Amino acid sequence: MIRNQKGFTLIEVIAVLVILGILVAVAAPRYVALVQEAKIAAAQAEVAEMKSTLNLAYARLFIRNGAAPATGVAVLEEAGFSDAAADNVGAVPDLWNVTLTGAGTSVNISVNSRNSDSEYTASGTWNIPS
């Protein structure tokens, strides 16, 4: 009696599992690196947003006073930030912790975290336009 049996042999199943294991071993490190790069890019975008906010505050001061502000601290105050203190910017789920420090005619920007995730870090400098 010969019956027509259908299905996969054990060797075929093991071969597929080995191939899937190799794919996961190659893809997992790339995924982790991609996540880290995305966090850095998001923090850099927040630095750019802070520079834009400072540009708007600078323009408001310039228009109101008829002259350029002399210090970065004046621009920080106009933007509603405290000098050299960590401020929370945004709202959940995008609550950024940012430190802005006035230094003469510039402002140093440090992104410390996003929603308490300290892997989101970047820094930059905004200068009073000349």
Image: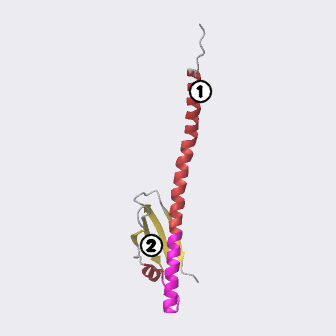
Is residue 51 one of those drawn in magenta? yes
From the viewer's side, name the closer residue of 110 and 1.
1
Closest to the camera, between mark 2 and mark 1, is 1
Against 43, residue 77 (above or below) is below
Residue sitting farthest toward the bottom:
66
The majority secondary structure of the magenta stretch comes to: helix
**Quarter of the image containing the C terminus?**
bottom right
Please tell me how many numbered marks the rendered image carries.
Answer: 2
Q: Is residue 42 visible?
A: yes
Is residue 58 one of those drawn in magenta? yes
Q: Quadrant of residue 77?
A: bottom left
**Mark 2, residue position:** 100
Q: Position of residue 4 (x, y in %)?
A: 60, 15
- Upstream in sequence: badge 2 or badge 1: 1
Does dot 1 land on a helix, a strand or a loop? Answer: helix
Tell me how the rendering is colored. secondary structure
- Disc 1 marks which amino acid? Ala
Q: Which residues are magenta?
A: 48-71
**Crowd class of label 1 (few under 14; some 14 to 19; many from 20; radius 10 Å):** few
Q: Position of residue 21 (x, y in %)?
A: 55, 34
**Quarter of the image containing the N terminus?**
top right
**Mark 1, residue position:** 15
- Disc 2 marks which amino acid? Leu
Residue sitting farthest toward the top:
1
Does dot 2 land on a helix, a strand or a loop? Answer: strand
Residue displayed at 51% across by 82% down:
58
Residue displayed at 40% across by 63% down:
92
From the viewer's side, name the closer residue of 35 and 103.
35
The alpha-carbon separation of the residues under discs 2 and 1 comes to 56 Å
